[in-house]
Image (cartoon, rainbow, N blue to C red):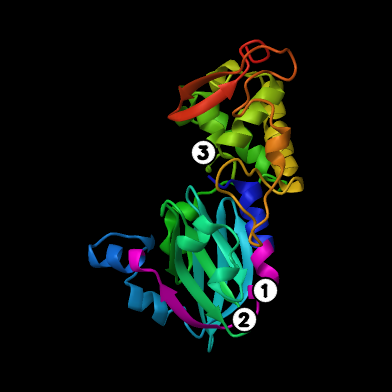
Amino acid sequence: MPELPEVEHVKRGIKPFAKGQKIESITYSDKVQEGKAANKETIIKGLELDTFKTFTEQYIITDIERRSKYIVFYLEKDGDQRILLSHLGMAGGFFVVDELEDIGNANYRKHWHVIFQLDNHKLLVYSDIRRFGEIRNLPSFDAYPSFLEIAPEPFDEEALPHYMACYDKSYYQNKPIKQMILDHRVIAGCGNIYACEALFRAGIHPATLPNDLNHQQREMLFYYVREVLQAGIDSGGTSISDYLHADGSKGTMQLHLNVYKQKYCKVCGNEIETAVIGGRNSHFCPHCQN
């Protein structure tokens, strides 16, 4: 699943070509249309396809931002402001091309689902191999309350105090620390890969209960989460399976992972173990993380 670093690079890849452009038309794939006809929310969620077009076509993309794992498109037409909110799911991605054939990866080229025709003659294409992603058109963020619950961005000044305050909430006290830091209400944008890596750097077993960590360990873990997220951004994201940049290139963070999908610990040489913790497959070193 694309996490904060990957989504950040998708945003950076499409923003120079899409910001300031008018969306002239929208084309849906057969899968999107068939899903809606069967009362399924396939990619386009919360609105009927014609209604989505009404509130998107002829609107100008005034800005594009990343918030946690979401890409936010700000739209405007004749004073009316809308928001496109997109989550990439497990294997979604945006590409900016002149024509579909320019998408270099065959899977993403085949599994396109929404095409936004821009007035600079570029195509902003949303592709999704597994169709777990989504795009919503909203009048404001208030129309999607769960988005408003997201923690401050991890690089913002208020992120650390917000995170530390979460340890006082009874909801998290009996959950594994791995599950806690994966909650976007605690730390924005931290997914499974980066949570595994941060816990390794902090020397904390992913099944540890939050109350078993002292103040220094809690604070140190936050800084390691932020460190690995920054490393992911600097490396262009992690391209282990499906993730690609908007131009079709790959990230290199997978070359720097210590535990996630690794066989041996790079520090002590012991075998990396895996376990399902908090519903997610966790990778850890039993010697370095205890």
Residue 175, compared with residue 126, is above or below; it is: above
Q: Counting residues from the N terminus, which is met first, the one under dot 3 or under dot 1?
A: 1
Amino acid type indicated by mark 3: Asp
Q: Gap in Å between the C-alphas at discs 2 and 1?
A: 8 Å
Return the residue nearer the eye: 21 or 96: 96
Is residue 175 something that shows in the picture?
no
Q: Which label sits in the foreground, 2 or 1?
A: 1
Residue 281 position within the rendered picture, expressed as x and y whole percent measured from the top left: 49, 28
| Residue at 63% from the left image edge and 44% from the top image edge | 239
- Earlier-in-chain disc, 2 versus 3: 2
How would you rate the neighbour count of disc 3 (Cα within 10 Å): few for under 14, some for 14-19, many for 20 or more? some
**Which residue in the protein does label 3 denote?**
183
| Amino acid type of the residue tagged 2 in the rendering | Gln
Residue named by callout 1: 17
**Contact, CB < 8 Å: mark 2 with mark 1?**
yes
Q: CA distance from mark 2 to mark 3?
A: 34 Å
Q: Report if residue 77 is visible in the image.
A: yes
Q: Are marks 3 and 1 in contact (CB under 8 Å)?
A: no
Mark 2 crowd level (few <14, some 14–19, many ≥20, 10 Å Cα): many
Does dot 3 land on a helix, a strand or a loop?
loop
The residue carrying mark 2 is 21
